[in-house]
Image (spheres, rainbow, N blue to C red):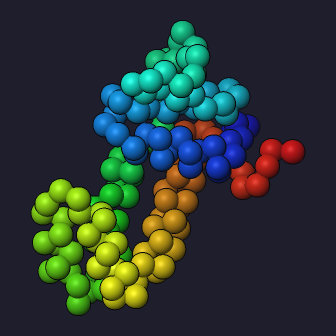
Amino acid sequence: MPTTILYSDLENAFFWSSSATRLQAEAFICLATGKTYFRGDDELDELPDDIEDGSRYVLVPGKNDLDLGRALVMRFTYRNAPHLEDRILDIFRRKGAYSRFKDLLLANDLLDSWHEYENQAVREALEEWASENGLAVRHGTLD
């Protein structure tokens, strides 16, 4: 039987892992208990000595590991804003792309659609990843 983890805990671990380079922010999930552990430049958690044991803990992916970065932006663009494709491609050729991308979406009344699309894609990708790693995701509480 798979170990259950709350979606909110998985999502927090995912956002932590996506917040910096892989060596600066890592999150792990214990496959036996579903407990999450966070490691970064500033140690947040007391980590188990065997945290690197892949048979006991799984490293939570970041957004680029799950094609939820630029690839997701382009999928959204092709589906919802093909008329903005050239501008969005140009935006992603330079640093600070996400804030300029969101400004462009706001100006074209697409920002809410983007947030819905992104949230749904993240949820689906995390649930699939969890299942592949022997975890059952539960929404709500573990009561």
Q: Residue at x 26, y 69 (%)?
A: 100
Hey, which residue is sitting farthest top in the picture?
49
Above or below, 57 against 132 in this view is above
Residue 129 at x, y percent in the picture: 51, 48
Q: Residue drawn at (79%, 49%), measured in percent from left and top? A: 141
- Residue 15: image location, x then y, percent: 48, 47
Q: Residue at x 39, y 51 (%)?
A: 63
Q: Is residue 17 left or right of residue 72?
A: right
Residue 57: in sight, yes or no?
no
Left or right: where 87 falls relative to 39: left
Tell me where residue 79 sits by quadrant: bottom left
Q: Quadrant of residue 94?
A: bottom left
Left or right: 96, with 24 as reference point: left
In the rendered view of the protein, which quadrant contains the N terminus? top right
**Front in this rendered view, residue 75 or 119:** 119
Evaluate whether residue 81 shows in this view: yes
Q: Give the x, y percent position of residue 88.
A: 21, 75
